Image: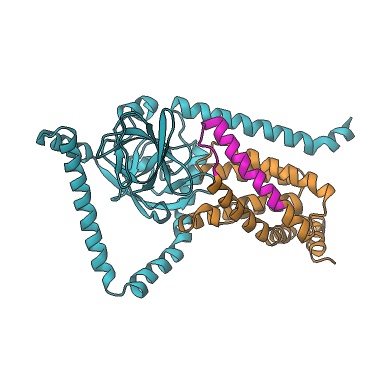
Amino acid sequence: MRDLLDRLRGTILFAVLVVVTLATMVGDRRAERSGERERTFVAGMVMDVAVPVQKAMAAPADAARELWSRYLALVGLRSENDRLRQRISTLEEENLQYREALVSSGRLQRIAEMRSDFEVAMLPSEVVGGDTSAWFRSALLDRGQGHGVRSGMPVVTDRGLVGLVTATSPRASQAMLLSDRQSSVDGLVQRSRAQGIVRGLRGDLLEFEFAVRGSDVRMGDVVITSGLGGVYPKGVRIGVVEEVGEAGDLLQTATLRPAVDFGRLEGVFVMLWRAPTMDLLYPEEGGS
Amino acid sequence: MRRLVGLLALGGVALLVQGTLAIFAPGFWLPDLVFLYAVGLAIAVGGAEALVLAAALGYAADLFSGALLGQHALLLVLACGATRIASLQLHLARSVPRVAFVAGLTVLYVLGHAALARLFVGAAGLDWSFARQLAIQTGLNALLAPLVVAGVARVSGWLAPDDEGFRRGLAVELRSRGL
């Protein structure tokens, strides 16, 4: 009997590990649904330790990239270019907000409301790691619960929406990018007000699915967050329509080029804001 | 114990390197170091030790990924088990069978991720551009596999508590060189 157990030791361990990992997955999915998906102490510690290490590991490559772009590629023009780009981004964002307010109601009152929507505290954060698997799209940020970051907070850059914080530890957090296949955002075509769902699709492109009837979507249209769904604030730029697909019986899809270049994410901002829906989803953390 | 801790630490380094590289290049342009490391463990270390290490590493990978907790762990344990079974039938210490095996296993591993994500979270399905990405990563994994397996065998040999581990690591290296 003992011999048999010795011989089957590997097989038994294999079976036990398969069952345990499957059970963990089911448990994590349940936790995600019930809004209790915060990293445990040990897992949080692993994430916290990884942040400075990954920062240090990325530093040489960052420095090389910076050196190349700053001194070799665009000698002297780089600083000026950066300043102008930043200015353009600010003006574009401002313009977008004004246009959005004017289109939706035509009242200046709405502009004030819109601005107050966006005037939430923005926490600058650095992307210190990408996803360890090519199948998923997420980013490890160097800010966590200790800095006020909570699951369900939107992550943006000056160009537009990046994604959503999905897990936090005391000094780090993980954000699911818009381009992840699991991501889904309620979007709105700014020009025609056509509404639909934006999903991560392939590479770094997004898919915009909308109802055929009554929707007017054209190439070059800007898609912004609709504010519906209670996750993201209204009016954050998602992307630009690059291609409109064939219409089906009920639904039609368009391909979006994201406003944010996910391949060059460095500095992002966590909006220290959670929609009321997210407060219901993550009650134990308290709303902000 | 020394070997277990050492190999776990090395796996952790592989994980951090993978996460750091992913900032600079799209994931499919990079070899999956964690997966290769688990395959290397199955070939060079084997037994219960390799399975436990693969599971631990998988859980750590889940923390730095959009996957559900346990997803990488499950697939790495399965990959480890499949490699052990295959090594009984195929001469995986040789480069050509190993490269072919790793290429096939990479495809199954990634499809496993896709299937689990679809099953548990309802993630979007696959399309043709995904096949191109998969082909790139499969090629990279297959090319790098001999190097990673040899590295794991050597480290495992250094960290072995007695000469048994060293002999096993050496045997893998010698066989891979056709000696």
Instruction: Give x and y (percent) for residue A175.
Output: 42, 43
Query: Eyeballing the image, is A32 above or below A159?
Result: above
Q: Nearer the viewer, residue A116 or A123?
A: A116
Give the side of residue A22 with respect to residue B91, left or right: left
Q: Nearer the viewer, residue B115 or A23?
A: B115
Residue A185's image quarter? top left
Query: Eyeballing the image, is A180 above or below B12?
Result: above
The C terminus of chain B, quarter of image: bottom right
Q: Is residue B95 visible?
A: yes
Residue at coordinates 74% horizontally, 43% vertically from top-left?
B82
Q: Nearer the viewer, residue A42 or A104?
A: A104
Q: Nearer the viewer, residue B66 or B48?
A: B66
Instruction: Give x and y (percent) for residue A213.
Output: 34, 28
Instruction: Give x and y (percent) for residue B15.
Output: 56, 52
Query: Is A40 one of the magenta-colored residues?
Result: no
Give the side of residue A165 with respect to residue A31, left or right: left
Label the orange chain with its letter.
Answer: B
Task: Identify the magenta region.
Answer: B102-127
